[in-house]
Image: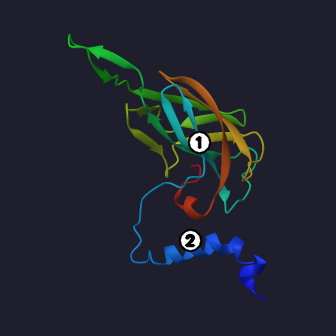
Amino acid sequence: MDIARTGVLAPAAPALLAGALLAGCGGNPVSTDVSPASGVAGQVGQVAIRNLFVLGGEGGAVIKQGGSAPVYLTMVNSPSSIESFGVSGSQAPRTEDDTLTSVSSPQAASTEIIGGPVRLPAGQDVQIGPSAKIVMRGLKKPLSTGQFILLTLHFQRSGSGSLNAPVQARQGDLQSYSPAP
């Protein structure tokens, strides 16, 4: 039986080629310090939301009704408006800081920002994690890995916006993230 002529090898060819090419890429892999990409992205005014998720129970365990769960995300305050400066008409981006003032969810009795509002300097990434800083308290229903939780983020300048954040199990790359205090 001629495998090449029967078409058995054809579907596997791209995978075999990729494997052969990558096999020569050995050596020392470069370690990077990046957060796991397990959440959702969105935009609230001039603030880009990246990797928004709720940390669930250890190894996928359910967090019971009345319990607490931390919220993790990265925010980037990206002012997009441009002002004119000086007589020559040169232009520069506006640099207005913003502030995350509160987070709310219909799934929790309350949501706390530990340490108070979070300042977002213009043009900078602000990562919440791996220590818990935003915590949903008094969960109204049990919280299971894989479900989505509606979170509304309230900013001083950018207003409010809601996103459905996935609940991720505290395992693998997320093991280093703190559970709710």
Q: Is residue 2 above or below residue 73?
A: below
Please state which of residues 97 and 13 is positioned toward the viewer in this rendering: 13
Q: What residue is shown at x 70% (from left), y 73% (from top)?
A: 10
Characterize the local packing of mark 1: few (<14), some (14-19) or many (20 or more) Cα atoms within 10 angstroms: many
Work out which residue is located at the far left of the displayed protein and give it.
87
Q: At which x and y percent is residue 146?
A: 73, 52
The image quadrant of residue 31 is bottom left
**Residue 115 visible in the displayed image:** no
The image quadrant of residue 107 is top right
Q: Which residue is mark 1?
A: 135
What secondary structure is marked by label 1? Answer: strand
Please state which of residues 157 and 84 is positioned toward the viewer in this rendering: 84
Check disc 1 and give the amino acid type: Val
11 relative to 176 in the view: left or right = right
152 relative to 32 in the view: left or right = right
Work out which residue is located at the far bottom of the displayed protein and give it.
1
Work out which residue is located at the far front of the displayed protein and give it.
5
Please state which of residues 147 and 94 is positioned toward the viewer in this rendering: 94
Q: At which x and y percent is residue 101?
A: 51, 28
Q: What number is the disc on residue 93?
A: none
**Residue 19 visible in the displayed image:** yes
Q: At which x and y percent is residue 49?
A: 53, 37
What secondary structure is marked by label 2? Answer: helix
From the image, state whether disc 1 or disc 2 is nearer to you: 2
Q: Which residue is mark 2?
A: 18
